[in-house]
Amino acid sequence: MRVVLAEDLFLLRDGLSRTLAEHGFEVAAAVETGPELLRALRELRPDVAVVDIRLPPTHTDEGLQAALTVRRERPALPVLVLSQYVEQLYAQELLADGHGAVGYLLKDRVTHTAQFVDAVRTVASGGTVMDPQVIARLMARSTARGTTADLSPRELDVLRLMAEGRSNAAVMAELHISESAVAKHTAAIFGKLRIDNTPDANRRVLAVLAYLKR
């Protein structure tokens, strides 16, 4: 699996490159600026991009914008963004196209090798990964109003775990419920959020987006 990595801090970039290589990934490019990232994504067409949100030259959101630009050209390009901060707007922008294959991980999480590698693999396979700390902070900044207000406490638990990128099996294990119960709660979530069952929509991602807007 080929990866393009963008991180402006040399030691972290080198460490992430080594970690990915040790776990079977091919690091096609490891760059440090927004323009370099945009060029690498377009020319190398990796299987997944691991991207720091803030890159030179301005250290604002060059990494995220480069990734989103290429996702518009190549829908569903898997992108895992890294950040020192929780920015609700960035998380929503990343999820907004509804294609999935996205993740938002806080940088202190990359020191946990297994979690980082699992997150890259999940995103590369089309899943959605949101750092639990991101979810917690977004919830703390939000209100209970909105479309998710109709969800039951158990349905909110299921949706929270979906937002963290958990599979149905992982939701079952975390909440100690059956597969049929997960399916029932998931169907109820989609119904209450009025997310249609269409072949073009990733309903789990749309549900997560509604959750982040709470």
Image (cartoon, rainbow, N blue to C red):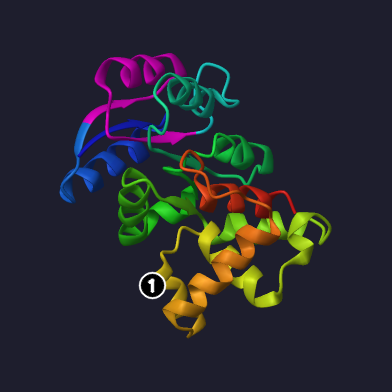
Going 51% across and 81% down the picture, which residue do you hit?
Answer: 175
The residue lying toward the viewer, choosing from 77 and 36, is 77
**Compared with residue 73, is residue 175 higher up or lower down, i.e. above or below?**
below
Q: How many marks?
A: 1
- The answer to whether residue 208 is magenta is no
Q: Which residues are magenta?
A: 28-52
Residue 110: x and y in percent read 40, 52
Going 61% across and 58% down the picture, which residue do you hit?
Answer: 190
Position of the C terminus by quadrant: bottom right
The image quadrant of residue 193 is: bottom right
Question: What's under tag 1, amino acid-wise?
Answer: Ala
**Compared with residue 63, is residue 14 higher up or lower down, i.e. above or below?**
below
Please indicate whether residue 213 sits to the left or right of residue 54 in the image: right
Query: Residue at the bottom extreme?
Result: 176
> Which residue matches tag 1?
169
Going 35% across and 52% down the picture, which residue do you hit?
Answer: 122
- The answer to whether residue 34 is magenta is yes
Residue 132: x and y in percent read 55, 61
